[in-house]
Image (cartoon, grey):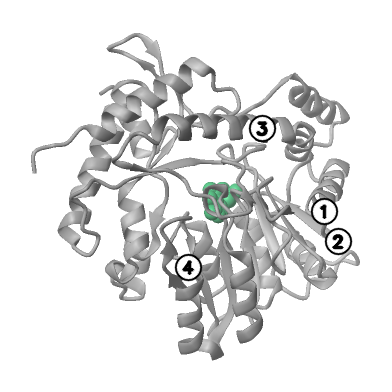
Amino acid sequence: MSIAHSLYALGFLDFYRVSCEDTAVESIPIVVADIDDDDAAATMEVLRRRWPGQGPKVEALEEEGATLTKRQHAVACHSGTAALHLTLLSLGVGSNDLVMTPAFSFVASANVVEYCGAKPLFVDIDLATYNIDPAALAGHCKQQQDKIAAVMVVHQFGLCADMASIESIATQFDFDVVEDAACALGSKLHGQEAGSFGEVACFSFHPRKVVTAGEGGMLVTDRAEVAQRCRLLRSHGLEAGGEMRELGFNYRMTDLQAAMVLSQLKRLPALLAKRQHHAAFYTERLQQVEELILPQAMQGSQPNYQSYVVRLQPEWLDATKMSSIERVKRKRDAMITACHEQGVMVRPAAYSLPALQYYQQKYALSPMSFPNSLLAANSTVALPIYPGLQEQELERVVSTVTEAARFEELP
Ligand SMILES: Cc1ncc(COP(=O)(O)O)c(C=O)c1O
């Protein structure tokens, strides 16, 4: 394996195009951002105005974001993580609070709880959708009702979470619902946009997402006081008159970022249609591979396929045994290596957060107490998916993944 391949496998080179040395075939990255001449022209327009910082483009993006999600307010900021952090602070989350978070996610979903001095209460996922399991959620609520301030609902990989069940639990136990819709721009549940359910919802414009400005984020809400507090905290906590009553941050978005996002939003339906086409292609071809479980969207939902994640489930897997989970992880890692050797740059999909050293040690967690999350973290693989993928490349991903998934090392 070349240095570039090794760095890529370790996650250091996210978007590096490496050519496959053995075959001299160009590799297929996990993602290629869809950036066209219109996006370039939109950013040039900002550059020509000689004010690349937060300005009229950010304002225009906020209007567009609110319209898209049928919300009253939108606040753009420099990342999805910043949007989540501002959201929790504005909802009043602080020390002594618990925020329920799926045990299988990207680290930001829990890290922002820590930033507020609160404690993430990890909840196991439903293996079918990779989203928080409402039954497990209800169980936690019964035990810790007094301290729970909010639930962070992630629509993982753009697959919608079971919002009806979650909202009914939230009403019963009286806590806020925050949608971590970082991956879910354009996903729909029963015709309703992801990001239009909770008190506040947050999006990300990182390059792995359906529209991107390199970095960027936005929160949407119907609560005017939440939006107002987020705006204040986004810019150091400084009021218009120059007074500073609380400590804020510099979480502002630039007009350069906003111009790029606005330009890409104009073609959002086309971007989504391509992703959905590619996902349907993978599903049709990979369903014959017995070792793989394919993404299962909730009934009545329309995912954006921000990611297309497959899960290895060999017939010998016994998810109640750590030794079996370790074995499936070895098989998953070997599958990733085999794909990389063919230039198909698949990636592990997400983390078991209670298994990460920081959380495991700080809260004395046992990762096996979140069995579905542990299994998902060790047996899933995200396949390349982006609008520009060509039919030949899709075929190549399918044949490479099929062969790699079927390979079985001697036990
Ligand atoms: C589920 C989830 N939440 C939050 C984030 C954070 O978004 P950002 O990278 O824009 O800070 C990500 C980003 O990958 C994510 O996947």
Under mark 3, the amino acid is Ala
Return the residue at label 3: 273
Of mark 4 and mark 2, the one earlier in the sequence is 2
Return the residue at label 1: 66
Q: Are marks 1 and 4 in contact (CB under 8 Å)?
A: no
4 or 2: mark nearer the eye = 4
Distance, label 3 to label 1, CA atoms, is 22 Å
Q: Are marks 1 and 2 in contact (CB under 8 Å)?
A: yes
Distance, label 4 to label 2, CA atoms, is 29 Å
Under mark 1, the amino acid is Ala
Of mark 1 and mark 2, the one earlier in the sequence is 1
Mark 3 CB within 8 Å of ligand 1: no
Distance, label 2 to label 3, CA atoms, is 27 Å
Under mark 2, the amino acid is Gln
Secondary element type, mark 2: loop
- Which residue is painted at 73% across and 65% down in the image? 233
Return the residue at label 2: 72
On the rendered structure, is 212 left or right of 323? right
- Which residue is painted at 88% across and 43% down in the image? 56
- Which residue is painted at 69% across and 60% down in the image? 201
Q: Are marks 3 and 4 in contact (CB under 8 Å)?
A: no
